[in-house]
Structure formats: structure tokens, C-alpha cells
Amino acid sequence: MTPSLNIRRTLLASGVCALCTVLTPGAFADTWPSKPVKIIVPYGPGGAVDVVTRKMAQKLTEQTGQSFFVENKAGATGTIGAQMVAKAEPDGYTLMANDTTYALLPHIFKKLPFDPASDLMPVGAFAFTPMALAVHANAKYKSLRELVADAKAQPNKVTYGSGGAGTTPHFASEALGIAAGANFMHVPFKGAAEATQAVLSGTIDMQIASTSGLMPNVRGGKLRLLAVSGDKRLASLPEVPTFAEAGVPWPGVVNWTGLWAPKGTPAAVLGRLQKEIATAMATPDMKAFAEGMGADPRQLQAEAFARMLKDSTEAWGKVAANTAFERQ
């Protein structure tokens, strides 16, 4: 064998080994993120998902030294933004944030431009947040009983807003109506924040939304909460009763925020991201942030998150079957 052939083979072998090193799972985790990471929120700015995701993006930026930023792509009950992420390059640089509404999608649409069960991979869920019924601080309704009594006396007179038909607040409000034996009028908006503004302007009477999105206006004296979901009052708002205490035998809905990645994203990247989320949720300032908006600062890893999504999808199917909502 000639010396030149030996050299070529040695160089080829070295190149293959170098390529193997680059492509090993550990290498992905070590080098990611090497550029800014975009998190698409499929709703308008200011809503619960947006507020929580921006805080998480801030923590991930601090921890990794690389920028994590939020981009809002609202519309079609979150499916516009979700489809963008489903079709994105599965390299860990485009993620989606969403909430309980994601589990509703199969019950909202007859056909989706992506498969919620397979085109997007659950990464983790965090900040489990109660939902509350909010009215304007100067609203005539001083209690949930008064609001329900008015709705019973004059069906469809009491109006409520949501981030769109088929969103969690929409179905939660309908579930409240079923439990209370009352009919409310639904006014859809492009996002929860728009619905909140409609309450503040007096355009609609009430809104059921995550406490994370409502708390700034509650603390500012602009909104008043008539009830919160769950089996106990919030430590941060001990004066606000649960729905059951307020006269409606309904537990309400506990919302959460989660992250998804496109199908095919390297397992090592997903694992690194899960570790970073867990680290973020364990920090004192993240715990204080979550607790300040009435949320439980726990988090679920991918496997547990996937199980919760499956269970939630089945549970929302039962709610959808008992409403007048028709799939689009």
C-alpha cells in the first residue's frame, strides 16, 4: 500500500469519527442552544399563556446564556401558530407554548392541518393555574349568586368573553352554565387579553380565565373576582370563594402552560430543555412568580405531560358532547 493511500484512508477515517462525534446525542445537548430559540405563543399578547411563557423564556435565557424569545401568532383557536411549529425544522430552535386548549382541538375542528397527537412532541408542563370568574371592579354583580340569578332570569343577557370559540375559557364558561342551570351569551375574541379589555371597557359582563392573566388588573383594582376553581381558596386572594362556596357545585378548571417541539426534534435537545425547565421552576423567583398569580409551581416531564394530555382530551370530549358547540 502506498503512503499516499494510507494518508487518504487515515484522513477519511478521522473525518468519519469526527462526524460521529458531532452527531452523537450528547453533542446535540452540549451545543444546543447555539442561536436564539423562538417560542411561538398561538394567542395574542397579555393572556395567561403569553405571561407565563415570557417568564419562562426569561429564565431559560438566563440559564443557557442564549436568547429565548416569544413570538405571538394568534388566530383559529391557536391552530395557526401550532401549525407553524408543526412544520418547522425539528432542530430545537422553534417551540410552541400552549395550555389546556390544546387538548380541546380534536373536539373543536372536524379536520386539523396537523395531527395534535403526533406532529408535535410534548416537552413539559408547568405553572398549574386556577381559573377565576372576573367582572369589572364596579360591576353591579357583587357575588356569583347575583350573576347566576340574573342569567337565569334573562337567558343570554349576561355576556362573557373568551380567546375564541373552542378555547378553554369558552368551554369552562359553558360548563359553568350547565352546572348553574343558566345560559350566558358568548362573545369570542382573538385572545384572553382582548376579552379582559372588553370586561374593563364594559363591553361584556364577565370572563373566566387563568388567574395568571387576571392578577395584574385585580391587584390594580380594575377587576374583581367572584370565584376561583379548585377545592380551596388562593393564599394570595383569601377573600375570593371557590365556585362551590359561591353557590355553584362545580370544581372549575385548572389551567397549565406547556411547551411542545416539532416531531423529530433530537431526544438530547428535548432532555436538555426538560432539565432547564425543571431548574427554572425550582428557582425562588419562579416560585414567587407562580405563587403570586395563584399557580402551583410544579412541572411535569414529557411522559407525564403526554398522559395528562390524553386524559384531558378525553375529559373535554365529554364536556363538548354536552354543549351546543359544533365542530368547525
Image (tube, rainbow, N blue to C red):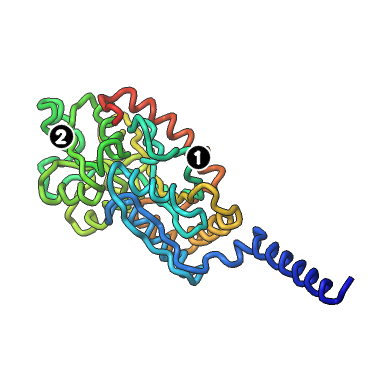
Can you give x and y, in whole percent of width and height, for residue 188 in the image?
Answer: 20, 40
Looking at the image, which residue sits at the far right?
1
Q: Nearer the viewer, residue 275 or 135?
A: 275
User: Above or below — where is 259 with respect to 20?
Assistant: above
- Which quadrant of the figure has residue 179? top left
Q: Nearer the viewer, residue 27 or 48?
A: 27
Q: Residues within 10 Å of mark 2 (few under 14, many from 20)?
A: few
Can you give x and y, in whole percent of width and height, for residue 217 in the image?
Answer: 22, 56
222 lies left or right of 248:
left
Q: Earlier in the sequence, mark 1 or mark 2?
A: 1
24 lies left or right of 292:
right
The residue mark sitting in front, 1 or 2, is 1
Q: Which residue is mark 2?
A: 146
Can you give x and y, in whole percent of width and height, for residue 309 in the image?
Answer: 47, 38
Residue at 26% across, 31% down: 174
- Which quadrant of the figure has residue 157? top left
- Which quadrant of the figure has residue 180? top left
Looking at the image, which residue sits at the far bottom?
3
Q: Disc 1 marks which amino acid? A: Ser
Residue at 36% across, 40% down: 101
Q: Disc 2 marks which amino acid? A: Glu
Can you give x and y, in whole percent of width and height, for residue 199 in the image?
Answer: 16, 47
Q: Nearer the viewer, residue 150 or 31?
A: 31
The quadrant the N terminus occupies is bottom right
Q: Which residue is mark 1?
A: 118
Residue at 76% across, 72% down: 11
